[in-house]
Image (cartoon, helix red, strand yellow):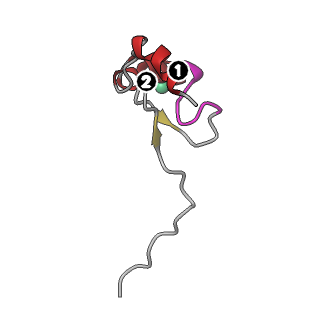
Amino acid sequence: MNTPPKKIGTDEPLFKCPSCKAFLPNTSVPSFPFCSDRCRLIDLGKWLDGSYTTSRPIDPTGNDEDIQHKH
Ligand SMILES: [Zn+2]
């Protein structure tokens, strides 16, 4: 009745660089999913700078006690 569904896999899907939102031509980019090594480092820096550290507060005062409690 209708036209047959398109073949899947013939066209490369479009990917976006998570850092600068640039479109990637395909997945063979060495720095995939980022468009470049620079963008990869920028995104990594965001992680280390922001959410990652805030979710894991560092308490230097509780460190000694913890070691003594170890059996
Ligand atoms: Zn980018």
Residue type indicated by callout 2: Trp
Provide residue 1's location: percent of width, then percent of height.
35, 88
Marks 2/1: CA distance? Answer: 32 Å
Tell me the residue that label 2 is attached to. 47
| Residue found 55% across the figure and 28% down from its top | 70
How many residues crowd mark 1 within 10 Å: few (<14), some (14–19), many (20+)? Answer: few
Toward the viewer: 60 or 3?
Answer: 60
Magenta stretch: give its range. 30-39
Front label number (2 vs 1) = 1
Say which quadrant the C terminus sits in: top right
Which residue sits furthest bottom? Answer: 1
Toward the viewer: 15 or 42?
Answer: 42
Provide residue 58's location: percent of width, then percent of height.
40, 17
| Residue found 49% across the figure and 14% down from its top | 64
The quarter of the picture where residue 56 lies is: top left
Q: Main secondary structure of the magenta part?
A: loop
Provide residue 3's location: percent of width, then percent of height.
40, 79
| Residue found 43% across the figure and 11% down from its top | 60
The number of discs equals 2
Provide residue 10's location: percent of width, then percent of height.
57, 60
Residue 33 covered by magenta stretch? yes
Image position of 38 (left or right of 2): right
Label 1 element class: helix
Mark drawn on residue 68: 1
The quarter of the picture where residue 29 lies is: top right
Which residue sits furthest top? Answer: 61
Label 2 element class: helix
